[in-house]
Amino acid sequence: MASLFSGALQLTDLDDFIAPSQECIKPVKVDKRAGSGVAKIHIDDDGSYFQINQDGGTQKLEKAKISLNDCLACSGCVTSAESILITQQSHEELRKVLETNKAAPAQHKLVVVSVSPQSRASLAARFQLNPTDTAEKLTAFFKKIGVHYVFDTTFSRNFSLIESQREFVQRFRRQADSAQALPVLASACPGWICYAEKMHGSCITAHISSARSPQQVMGSLVKDFWAQQQGLTPDRVYHVAVMPCYDKKLEASRPDFFNQEHQTRDVDCVLTTGEVSRLLEEEGVSLPDLEPVPLDALPSSVSAAEPTSHQGGGSGGYLEHVFRHAARELFGIHVAEITYKPLRNKDFQEVTLEREGRVLLHFALAYGFRNIQNLVQRLKRGRCPYHYVEVMACPSGCLNGGGQLKASDTPSKELLQRVEELYRAVRTTAPEDVPGVQELYRQWLHGEGSARAGRLLHTQYHAVERPGSSRSIKW
């Protein structure tokens, strides 16, 4: 299980189930009634924990249940205990909601599933389908088991890209303001965010874009705009996101994305691509055999929905969209083609905008933990030359997320190449030109740059206080 979360969250390679590689706030449940003084903890050869009381007696300790909120409050990072951490979000939880809908109508919730384009591409590669057929057959499957609506998170990514573009231009124009520091670091990867908050704090979080990820923008759309359109309060809607990595479960559990008034999360459950495949198997359903059902459109004024994507890489194209927008807005330059310059490896590349020999914009992408570490060290030393960096925790980005499908009979490199091809096989659109986006800015958000847009499409990142070194275990 140690490979489920991204590399930025796996600082060691233990298979200890619950024993942490860093300081874990709940390693075991200690019986404080057993003896008066401080009990000692002994770890047996098989990994079991024993409490040694002052009278010499021993007691085997029960493994602690760590919630996702506990994890995010921890001063270390996610360890190999993900088998416990993800119990709050799984396909079994979705199944329970669907069963409750059938058995107890009074507790009925409208169930909404939003599917990421990365997961769609991975499933298409597994079942040898094209992306459109995959999206529509997946819609048919979810509705077959009781889901009411299925959306494509590419739609919510339009808002994430537009807000990222606008925020970068604003920060660039206010470079002297240390509170809005350059470079701007992309915020769509929760593995990177979790690592930055816990390991580096405010010196790095000040650089992170405040734009919400597509998953959390979709959470706002579903629980705020769409729920209102259905005449429902947010707690009467159960929102499931299908994502390419387990880190997204951590993102959905953040207190920042919890509605206190209605006691509900923007995203109630995150399923990885692999968990959807497992659900198909458990239901005895062959995806290729299903009759296609069109995706639902959001907003409903859009007559039909089809799978789409954006220009740029498989992690959302943040660098390319922000780069093109900034070149046009700041310097009046239209960028037709973007040329990447690989540096140390294919996961660290640069893009520059030049005029008359002068560098106007200097962007980069940094994927994978090693490249992230190098980026952070350069930032801390004041030697980071970039204006914007697209940061992703997984090598090769989101298409290679830990929750994506693997194939034992296909080399991983070939499989990733196939997934990349399928990801790019759909029509690409500019965020500003997508039907319904500008309508929602007017109708739902009361205009671009409004206070309401700031509240629903942006968030804040927080340094996590660390009482001691996370490199040693303290009991």
Image: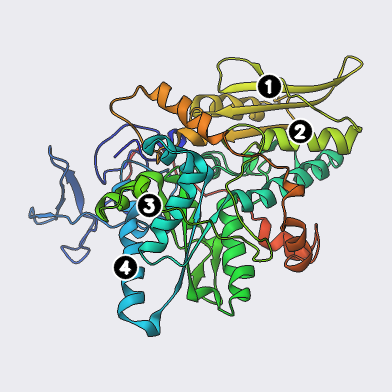
Q: Is residue 163 left or right of residue 224?
A: right
Please identify the quarter of the rendering in which residue 87 is found: bottom left
Q: Amino acid at mark 1?
A: Glu
Q: Position of residue 453 (x, y in %)?
A: 73, 61
Q: Position of residue 214 (x, y in %)?
A: 59, 50
**According to the image, label 1 marks what residue?**
350
In primary-sequence order, the first of circles 2 and 3 is 3
Marks 2 and 1 close (CB-CB < 8 Å) = no
Real-space CA distance between mark 2 and mark 4, rounded to the nearest whole angstrom = 44 Å
**According to the image, label 2 marks what residue?**
323
In primary-sequence order, the first of circles 4 and 1 is 4
In primary-sequence order, the first of circles 2 and 1 is 2
Number of marks? 4
Q: Amino acid at mark 4?
A: Lys
**According to the image, label 3 marks what residue?**
290
Real-space CA distance between mark 3 and mark 1, rounded to the nearest whole angstrom = 44 Å
Task: Please name which of the two marks, 2 or 4, marks the residue nearer to the observer.
Answer: 4
Which is more toward the observer, 392 or 100? Answer: 100
Helix, strand or loop for disc 1: strand
Q: Residues within 10 Å of mark 1 (few under 14, many from 20)?
A: some
Q: Residues within 10 Å of mark 3 (few under 14, many from 20)?
A: some
Q: Amino acid at mark 3?
A: Leu
Q: Position of residue 397 (x, y in %)?
A: 52, 32
Residue at x 63% of width, y 52% of height: 155
